[in-house]
Amino acid sequence: MKLATYKDGSRDGQLVVVARDLAQAHYATGIASRLQQALDDWNFMAPQLQDLYEQLNAGRARHPFPFDPQQCMAPLPRAYQWADGSAYLNHVELVRKARGAEVPASFYADPLMYQGGSDDFLGPCDDVVVPSEAMGIDFEAEIAVITGDVRMGASPDQALDGVRLLMLANDVSLRNLIPAELAKGFGFFQSKPATAFSPVAVTPDELGDAWQGGRVHLTLQSTWNGRKVGLCEAGPEMTFHFGQLIAHIARTRNVRAGSIVGSGTVSNKDWTRGYSCIAEKRCIETIQDGQPSTEFMQYGDTIRIEMKGRDGLSLFGAIEQQIAPHSR
C-alpha cells in the first residue's frame, strides 16, 4: 500500500491512503489520523489500511479525492530518529580518490552512519531554504526506510523484517560547512539542514521483485534545473543493505517504530549513469581534470528526484524542490 501525510495546519498532518497510480487518495480517518499511530500499532492497523487501499484501487472507496503532492508533508513530518548511512561505497571511494586518500579497510565491513535532525522534515514540494549560497548547496538523492520496533542485537535478517515502508529522500548538504565541522571530530550538524522525503511511503510488497535482499533494484532519477543528471541503479552497488544498516544501529540500542534509516547517496561506478549529488560530479572532475568545474546550487535552482517501477509509473511520487533564501 501507499501512504502519505496531508497538510492540515498541525505539526503531524493527516494520514491518507494513496492509490497505486497516485491519482486518488482517501483520508485514513477512523483507522489512524497520523502515520506514527499506525507504526506504533502496525499489526492491528496495517490490515485495515490495506483494506482501504484495495477499495481505493478498485474504485469502491466512499470518499476519494484527487491526490495532490503539493499538499503533502513528509510521510513522517517528524520522527523519533533519522539515521543516514553511506551504503554506496563508490561514493566514498570517489570522495577519497579526489583528495588523494585511501578508503580504510574497515569501511567495507562497518557502515558509515550519522544521526541527523528529525524534528523538522521538509515536504516533497517545500522550498529548500538556505541562509547563503556561499554554503555550497547540494542535493543528495537517496532511498530511505521507516522501521517498526527492532530489538537491540538483532541480526541483519531480523532487522530487515522491521522495514515497514520505503520512500525517497533529498538529504540536503551544505558542502562548504562540512570540512570545519568534521575537523571538530563530532560529525555533521549545521552542514545538514532539513531533509525532504517523497510524497508517499510504500510497503515493500509494492516493489515486487525489485525489492530483493534489502535493496531496491530500480533506477533513481535526479533532474537538476530541468536537465536529467542522474540515472543511477540503486540495487547492485549498495554495499550494505537496509537490514545491515538497521542492525548497525541496533548493536547497542533498541530501534523504535518510526525510525527512518537512509541509504546515503546512490552511486554507480559507471560514470555515464550520472550522479545523485553535485559533490560526486565535482570529485569526478577533479580526478579527470585536476579541479572541479561544476558549481553548487544557487537560489532559484530546482531539483527533482523520482523512481519509476517496472511498469514505468512513478513509485513514490517525485520530490520537486526549489532553492530559496532565508527571509529574516
Image (tube, rainbow, N blue to C red):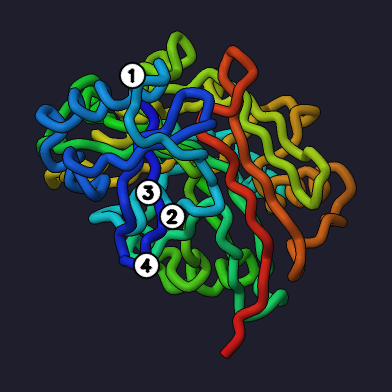
Tell me the element at label 1. Answer: helix
Mark 4 to mark 2: distance in Å?
A: 10 Å
Q: Residue under circle 3?
A: 5
Q: Residue under circle 1?
A: 54
Residue at image x 59%, y 30%?
A: 307
Asked whether residue 57 is in view, the answer is yes
Given contact means CB atoms under 8 Å apart, are the residues at marks 3 and 2 in contact?
yes
Q: Amino acid type of disc 1?
A: Glu
Q: Residue under circle 2?
A: 73
Work out whether mark 4 precedes mark 2 in sequence or the reverse, and give the earlier one.
4
Q: Quadrant of residue 265?
A: top right
Q: Where the N terminus falls, by quadrant?
A: top left
Q: Which of the two discs, 2 and 1, sits closer to the camera? A: 1
Q: Amino acid type of disc 3?
A: Thr
Q: Amino acid type of disc 4?
A: Gly
Most distant residue in the front direction: 62
Q: In front: 201, or 146? A: 201
> Residue 9 — which label?
4
Q: Is residue 119 above or below residue 243?
A: below
- Determine whether, in the image, residue 62 is placed left or right of residue 46: right
> Residue 293 — which label?
none
